[in-house]
Image (cartoon, helix red, strand yellow):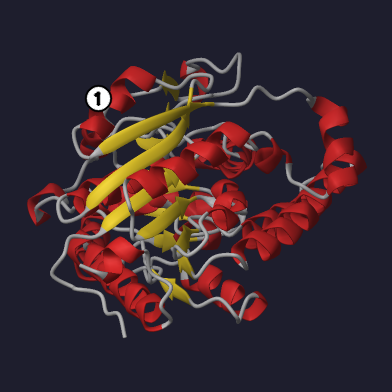
Amino acid sequence: MPATDTTDPLRLLVAAPMLYHPRCGNGGGVLCFELLRRLAAEAEVHFVAFGGGPGEDDAEALTALRAVARQVHVVPRPRPWLGGPASMLLQLASGTPREVRDLRSETMRRRLSEVAAVAEVDCVLLQFPHMAQYADGFPGLPVVVDVQDACIVSRYREWRSSQTSGQSPWRRWQRLHSWWAWSRRELRDYARAQRLMALSETDLGVLRAFLPQVPAFLSPVAWDTVPALAAAPRPGGPVLLMGNFAHAPNADGLRWLLAEVWPRVRAQCPQARLQLAGRHLPAGLADDPAIGLEVLGFVDDVQPLLARAALSLVPYRFGGGIKIKALEAMAQGCPVVATRVGSEGLGGVDGVHLRVADEPDDFAAAVVGLLQAPALGEQLALQALALVSERFSWARKVEQLKVELRGLLRERAALGALPRARQAA
């Protein structure tokens, strides 16, 4: 019976919807790059992704990716041919989410098949729900979907949030239909994989409940921590909100913060300053000294911002997975105030590792409390650093993934389903 030689380096095909790199401004992309970099230190990685998207820095991404992967293949991103209401009607008629349809590409399908065959890879890792549509393109090869964000969870929360946030009936219907289309698509595409990789306990539970036939495992996000000395009081420092504001949970959180929370904070702390850092901030949003608003836009390196900030905010009202911006702030010794959704999956306790609040009054009170008592923020930051070091180490994440991949290869070998080259190794 064929068996896998566990001393041989793994040969992996990794496919993603974008060319990510350490400064891409997308939390999930940064996480995926760091995972790729660490996998490539011990495995032969062949990377395939869409390029040429609006606002993407392909040159910087390609330089970073080519420094770690054995090969990097770029497939031109398809140009969407419908938008607005017409796109929604097509989604209704087809049952396929717009984001999936916009990344449907026969060129990508052919390239993935070619790379898998020529490189004689052992496993395929498809990152993000958008890429799961290609899971059926590798006969005989085990496929793992790195879910990142289970849309069956996040889109449901987005719809539920729209019911109480004063959105129009049309907008609420859009949210409901997006959840329906994504749920339908995920259940179909994920069923074609051999493993599902979840970032949070919530996503893991939902995947196991709806797809019991596909083994799923937890692979939490990971982040490097700074020395405990960095978690020092920052009296007078700004309050920081960072993110990619093209992402719906970030955009909604920003609107909620500016309309409902920040006026309450300023009423009690007139000198408080709010810094906004990230891509795709709403047009027309600019510095406003009257409310203490500073609009930074995209920043190459957020670590200096986190080092100076009095605290960092994660005002998500919907979304899935683990909020990387919360983890990043905690790992940098910056106190965090988050909603329950924003703190999900971190294992943090309100008042021990961070402050957690959902209502505008409570969220504002948590912010004011930390601004007025910097020593309390320092205590939370120190305990948060210890939590991140213990639960979210890169060494643990990479080792667990390697164990899962090796186990999958042994299963396939027992069934005689591995490629001949690998069986003979």
Image side of residue 166 versus residue 411, left or right:
right
Tell me what residue is drawn at x 62 percent, y 35 percent: 106
Vertical position of residue 86 compared to residue 209: above or below: above
- Say which quarter of the image contains residue 349: bottom left
User: What residue is at 20 percent from the left and 67 percent from the top?
Assistant: 425
- Residue named by callout 1: 63
Q: In this rendered view, identify the residue nearer to me: 135 or 380.
A: 135
Q: Secondary structure at mark 1?
A: helix
Q: Which of the 4 image quadrants contains residue 150?
A: bottom right
Across and down, in percent, residue 367 comes to 43, 49
Q: Residue at x 53, y 63 (%)?
A: 340
Where residue 261 appears, x then y in whole percent? 57, 43
In the picture, measured across the screen, residue 102 lies left or right of residue 235, that is right
Task: Report the residue at 58% width, 72% height from top.
Answer: 207
Q: Is residue 174 left or right of residue 364?
A: right
Q: Is residue 200 above or below residue 36?
A: below
- Between 149 and 280, which is closer to the camera in this rendering? 149
Q: Nearer the viewer, residue 239 or 242?
A: 242
The N terminus sits in image quarter? bottom left
Camera-nearest residue between 99 and 388:
99
Residue 297 visible to an observer of this rendering = yes
Q: Is residue 329 visible?
A: no
